[in-house]
Image (cartoon, rainbow, N blue to C red):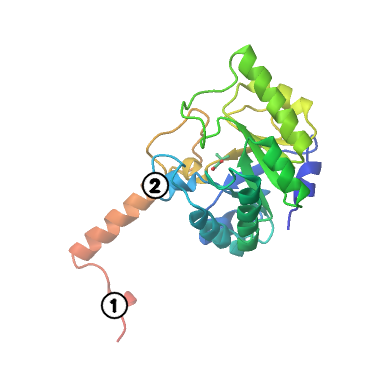
Amino acid sequence: MTTPNQIKSMKSKRKIVMLTAYDFPTAKLMDGVVDIILVGDSLGMVVLGYENTTKVTMDDMARATGAVARAAKNALVVGDLSIGTYDSQEDALKNAKILLEAGAQAVKIERKPETAEFLAKNEIQVMGHIGLTPQTITNFKVQGKNEEDAKRLLEEAIQMDKAGCFSLVLECIPMGLAEKITSSISIPTIGIGAGIHCDGQVLVTHDILGLFEAFKPKFVKRYAETGKEMRNAFEKYSEEVREGKFPTDEYSFH
Ligand code: KIV
């Protein structure tokens, strides 16, 4: 089982690979292939059909984390603390423990270095997340484009490092700024829409598989057209049932 410390020691040695999963079969297929499986609150959009992540609950996250953890024998499992579950430090600790009990080895939080520090002091492994943080940012644009924002993001990254995070997600920031942040902090950066210079990369699995068709951000590369494959299978099955071609003898009992 990959540990947060092993992830930390991969900085500058080899690229870290992270993907999201929210269910047992998907996690089983990616375990042993990727280093980290993130049970992200992107589940709200790609699994539960919400417009954004703001309706995701602790129950949603705990159930998905349990399913993923039952499949993951090699990858590090990180569970997202959903919106409103870490507004106070006490809540953060209580809810982090729920995800750990469900099987995660670490939790991810958006910004909030003081909370990250509190969790780390209570022996919870924390992955930070800065840049475009969907729980609080409503303008879904590249972050840190002007000098002032870039300075703030660099400062935030340094604070998350000092707080004791074992890694940091950088979402939707210019590649030059991501490079500067990566070389300025001691923990690995994991980029999504943050360019090639990060220590690792993450994408939402439904995006790379072509399973989420509502929109495709610029930074998403599709590695498969699973949505099209599924639709073909549904159409073929429906056609065969309607035409009385399924089930044949091969699929029947005598
Ligand atoms: O919820 C999620 O999937 C995430 C990734 C996009 C980093 O936070």
Kind of residue at disc 1: Asp
Q: Residue at x 48, y 51 (%)?
A: 57
Determine which residue is flagged by label 2: 227
Q: Residue at x 23, y 65 (%)?
A: 241
Say which of 74 and 236 sits in front: 74
Q: Position of residue 115 (x, y in %)?
A: 68, 41
Residue 238's disc number: none
Q: Residue at x 44, y 42 (%)?
A: 210
The answer to whether residue 219 is above or below residue 25 is above
Determine which residue is flagged by label 1: 249
Furthest-left residue in this view = 243
Label 1 crowd bin: few (<14), some (14–19), many (20+), radius 10 Å: few
The answer to whether residue 211 is above or below residue 131 is below
Q: Is residue 220 left or right of residue 249?
A: right
Looking at the rendering, which quadrant does residue 194 occupy?
top right
Kind of residue at disc 2: Gly
**Local SS, label 2:** helix
Q: Position of residue 216 (x, y in %)?
A: 44, 33
Mark earlier in primary sequence (2, 1): 2
